Amino acid sequence: MAQATVLRVRDLDVRLAGREVLQDVTMDVVSGELMGLLGPNGAGKTTLLRSILGLIPKQRGTVEVATRNGSEMVSGRAARTHIGYVPQRHEFAWDYPISVYQCVLNGQAGKRGLFRRATVADHRAVAEALERVHLSALADRPIGQLSGGQRQRVLVARALASNPSLLLLDEPFTGMDFPSIELLCDVLDELCTTDGISALMITHDLPQAVHICDRITLLNGSVVASAAPRELRDPEPWTHTFGVRSDSPLLRALGLEKGAGTKETPTPKGASA
């Protein structure tokens, strides 16, 4: 049975400051899927996320997002209400004197309005979001006292509290230690596999992406390839996307270098170990 489409991007062109940043981008994310969006700096990854959010005007193309109940695909402002956005951690004011709970609750302001009091349902959604990211025990802790990994999970909880059908994550692993990365990977896997949420994630941690993502989209202005990690074992799409040689350390880290030795490499998701 085919999985339902949650994000549908078709023929997307975006120009910024007179420069064409995205050309003819077409991609889908389906229900319960964790999609990795990979590419070099300047490839248009963050521009794509912001275009999906409706923050950047597009020259051409369409962006549609499924409603929470999956009954229809919507676009424009209507689509934004079904998206949870997880920004880069450094973009948030962590010195603001509020608790973890209040931080997540404040994330709902865009949905309910700045001057409307939170309802019982709003508080229930916050409690559930904190539980899903394993932060219930830290609900009363000031956000300034959190570790980097805990802060990242707070941002995920803020996005979840609005009950989205789609999560957009911008480099969630940056600056985190290995135990924190592993815990966040477990959280994302549970959200997608158990809760059926879809996620599109920008990351520069290529081995981690190959290991945890259901599919990977290689982007450099346009889509170079989009497939399950086990189907991206040919070095050519990677060299084309990142502009590296066939003997690059990048390919060696992914186990894609021609004539690679016996060093342990990440097992692509869906492949036999």
Image: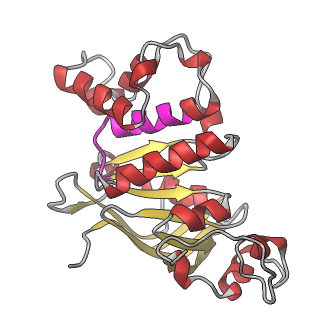
Foreground residue, 99 or 210? Answer: 210
**Residue pictured at 76% horizontal, 76% vertical:** 251
In this rendering, the answer to whether 65 lies above or below 214 is above
State yes or no: residue 160 in magenta: yes
On the question of residue 37 being in view, the answer is no
In this rendering, the answer to whether 266 lies above or below 148 is below
On the question of residue 104 being in view, the answer is yes
Q: How is the image coloured?
A: secondary structure
Magenta stretch: dominant SS? helix
State yes or no: residue 73 in magenta: no
**Residue pictured at 34% horizontal, 26% vertical:** 109
**With 3 as the anchor, is 178 left or right in this view?**
right
Part of the protein shown in magenta: 152-165
Q: The N terminus lies in which quarter of the figure?
A: bottom left
In this rendering, the answer to whether 238 lies above or below 118 is below
**Residue pictured at 81% horizontal, 85% vertical:** 246
The picture places residue 66, in percent across and down from the top left corner, at: 26, 60
Q: Quadrant of residue 236?
A: bottom right
Foreground residue, 231 or 36? Answer: 231
In this rendering, the answer to whether 21 lies above or below 53 is below
Across the whole image, how many numbered discs are drawn on residues? 0
The picture places residue 237, in percent across and down from the top left corner, at: 66, 84
**With 259 as the anchor, is 161 left or right in this view?**
left
**With 42 as the anchor, is 259 left or right in this view?**
right
Foreground residue, 255 or 239? Answer: 255
Q: The C terminus lies in which quarter of the figure?
A: bottom right
**Most distant residue in the left direction:** 71
The picture places residue 94, in percent across and down from the top left corner, at: 60, 22
The picture places residue 206, in percent across and down from the top left corner, at: 66, 64
**Residue pictured at 84% horizontal, 82% vertical:** 245
